Image (spheres, rainbow, N blue to C red):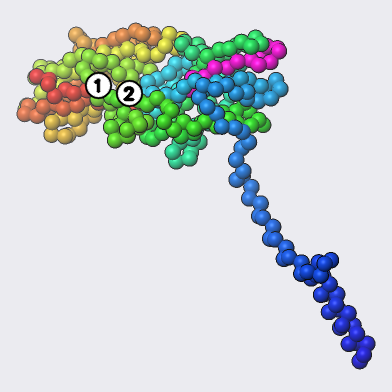
């Protein structure tokens, strides 16, 4: 019995000794380990400033970079033979910047020398995957820079039609630190005629662009304008309007609006989608062939950059109802609209 009591006493002393520091004070309770959460650490890098030069990348990948400006546009951008057109729910972000070779040997530069990521107001990333152009031209960037040589270039990327782009991330590759740019209030907005008036920053595009008569506006590869609109009871393409109806005939101008480095573009009846809204708010979709201006013959063709053509479209209207607007789109392009309310 004494042996058991002695063993218990020794165990108690051992437990007490583990709770005391060498000075006799109680040891502090161990701190809980901080849990590790993967994918939450921000990429290494710095904060960039417009107009200030930084070196991106290391070793042979090193390149001096200066972000000069950023702007929004709804117009197409041509780089080489490639034509970048914003879709109906997009606008384009154009980044203008300078590249300089900081190395003692020549360095090749092209569209993938740098990686651009635009971050929208919903924190969604939009990656640049287009060719880069030489500033002031539509020529594609693909050249060799001599030591210390500089060149001004631009990159274009599609971003949402609505809202700002608060952040831009630039890097020379995934293995190198990035440079972050705060673009809030620093991106040139859309032209007032193209911007939603509810957004004072001019960063949101109007859903439909209303265009003055005889003024070209961009669609996809083509620009279009309304030359004339008239009401007519006469037969068109061998068809007389039914009793109580007449035609609204619109004469339109067409132009290949791409830069000279682009290829010729073909146009035909299914290149464009037309829609007429009358004064009663009713909509009629055009589903017939385009006609030549002076002859009831099918109009189509191929236009080189800068070349123009003209054609007609026509819609049936009740005798006592006027036309209101004629809208048109090309493929997935934005819609432009012309007023035809003055047609007589």
- Where is mark 1, residue-wise? 211
Q: Is residue 241 visible?
A: no
Left-right relation of 109 to 336: right
User: Which contiguous range is marked in magenta?
Assistant: 95-107
Q: Nearer the viewer, residue 257 or 303?
A: 257
In the rendered image, residue 102 lying in the magenta stretch gets the answer: yes
Q: Is residue 5 above or below residue 177?
A: below
Q: Nearer the viewer, residue 81 or 173?
A: 173
Mark 1 crowdedness (10 Å alpha carbons): few <14, some 14-19, many ≥20? some
Measured in 3D between alpha carbons, the distance from the residue under mark 1 to the one under mark 2, in whole angstroms, is: 13 Å
Residue 202's label in the rendered image is: none
Q: Residue at x 65, y 25 (%)?
A: 57
Mark 1 touching mark 2, by CB under 8 A?
A: no
The secondary structure type at the circle numbered 2 is loop
Mark 2 crowdedness (10 Å alpha carbons): few <14, some 14-19, many ≥20? some
Instruction: Where is residue 95? Give x, y as percent.
Output: 48, 22
Q: Residue pushed farthest front?
A: 23
Q: Residue at x 28, y 29 (%)?
A: 208
Q: Residue at x 63, y 28 (%)?
A: 173
Left-right relation of 142 to 335: right
Instruction: Where is residue 76? Give x, y as percent.
Output: 40, 20
Which of the marked residues, 1 or 2, is nearer the chain's N terminus?
Answer: 2
Residue 191's label in the rendered image is: 2
């Amino acid at each position: 019995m004494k042996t058991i009591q002695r063993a218990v006493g020794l165990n108690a002393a051992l437990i007490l000794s583990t709770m005391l520091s060498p000075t006799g004070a109680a040891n502090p309770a161990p701190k809980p380990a901080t849990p590790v959460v993967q994918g939450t650490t921000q990429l290494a890098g710095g904060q960039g400033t417009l107009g200030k030069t930084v070196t991106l990348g290391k070793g042979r990948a090193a390149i001096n970079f200066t972000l000069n400006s950023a702007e929004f546009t709804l117009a197409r951008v041509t780089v080489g033979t490639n034509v970048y057109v914003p879709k109906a729910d997009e606008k384009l972000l154009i980044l203008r910047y300078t590249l300089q070779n900081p190395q003692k040997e020549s360095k090749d530069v092209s569209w993938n020398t740098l990686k651009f990521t635009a971050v929208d107001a919903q924190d969604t990333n939009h990656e640049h995957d287009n060719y880069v152009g030489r500033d002031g031209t539509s020529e594609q960037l693909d050249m060799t820079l001599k030591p210390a040589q500089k060149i001004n270039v631009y990159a274009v990327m599609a971003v949402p039609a609505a809202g700002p782009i608060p952040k831009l991330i630039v890097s020379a590759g995934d293995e190198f630190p990035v440079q972050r740019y705060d673009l809030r209030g620093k991106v040139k907005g859309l032209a007032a005629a193209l911007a939603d008036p509810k957004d004072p920053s001019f960063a949101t595009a109007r859903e439909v662009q209303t265009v003055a008569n005889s003024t070209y506006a961009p669609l996809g590869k083509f620009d279009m304008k309304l030359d004339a609109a008239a009401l007519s009871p006469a037969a068109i393409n061998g068809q007389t309007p039914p009793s109580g109806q007449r035609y609204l005939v619109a004469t339109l101008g067409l132009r290949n609006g791409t830069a000279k480095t682009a290829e010729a573009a073909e146009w035909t009846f299914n290149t464009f989608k037309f829609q007429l809204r009358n004064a009663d708010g009713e909509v009629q979709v055009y589903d017939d062939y385009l006609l030549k201006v002076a002859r009831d013959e099918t109009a189509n063709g191929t236009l080189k950059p800068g070349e123009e053509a003209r054609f007609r479209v026509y819609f049936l209207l009740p005798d006592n109802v006027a036309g209101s607007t004629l809208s048109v789109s090309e493929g997935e392009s934005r819609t432009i609209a012309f007023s035809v309310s003055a047609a007589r």
